[in-house]
Amino acid sequence: MSMGRGNKLPHYAPLWVDPSKETYFVTINCEPRGANQLAKPEVAAFIWETVRYRRDRGLWNYHVILLMPDHLHALLNFPPSDTPFRSLISKWKEWLAKQLGIRWQDDFFEHRLRSDESLNQKVTYILENPIRKGLVTKPEDWPFVLFNER
């Protein structure tokens, strides 16, 4: 089955999964790919403010969020809520689009970390993304990363 442009990605966890006890690896792409909409100091500062606001309101918790020019990666947890996490992310994307003019692709990719996957492995993968793209030579040289300071 092919995923055409109009199709939505599934974001439903199996019934035995409690989303509030899981960590999700989330990737959100901009449109068009290749244009720098995110890796800018003023954009990053605003996004970090919105991320912390949502954490402080108990909507989510984050381990790390990294902005690339045309996409972002995040490791997120979602506390128990009547609002599905896909709605929380969609509303956040809408807010950022209105406030910053970011053009997002319609959906996003999420992957629930399984028991055999290490959180540290995913953090390393995320932090090495700017190296793989040839933007820096060391992870600590990439300025557009936010770690949860709590």
Image: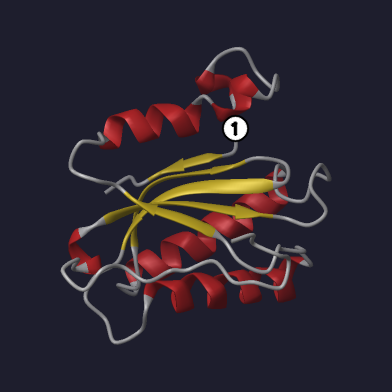
Question: How does the figure colour the protein chain or chains?
Answer: secondary structure
Kind of residue indicated by mark 1: Pro
Which residue sits at x=32%, y=45%? 149
10 Å neighbourhood of mark 1: few (<14), some, or many (≥20)?
Answer: some
Residue 27 in the figure: left or right of residue 39: left
Looking at the picture, how far across and down is residue 129, in whole percent?
57, 29
Which residue sits at x=52%, y=46%? 73
Counting every numbered tag in the picture gives: 1
Looking at the picture, how far across and down is residue 101, in whole percent?
79, 67
Label 1: which residue? 143
Looking at the picture, how far across and down is residue 127, in whole percent?
48, 29
Residue 60 drawn above or below residue 26: below
Looking at the picture, how far across and down is residue 125, in whole percent?
45, 29
Residue sitting at the far top: 137
Q: Quadrant of residue 91?
A: bottom right
Residue 17 in the figure: left or right of residue 96: left
Residue sitting at the far front: 1
Q: Quadrant of residue 82?
A: bottom left
Q: Nearer the viewer, residue 51 or 25?
A: 25
Q: Quadrant of the N terminus?
A: bottom right
Which residue sits at x=59%, y=32%? 143
Q: Nearer the viewer, residue 121 or 93?
A: 121
Q: Secondary structure at mark 1?
A: loop
Residue 69 drawn above or below residue 48: above
Residue 21 drawn above or below residue 119: below
Q: Nearer the viewer, residue 24 or 40?
A: 24
Residue 101 in the figure: left or right of residue 79: right
Residue sitting at the far bottom: 82
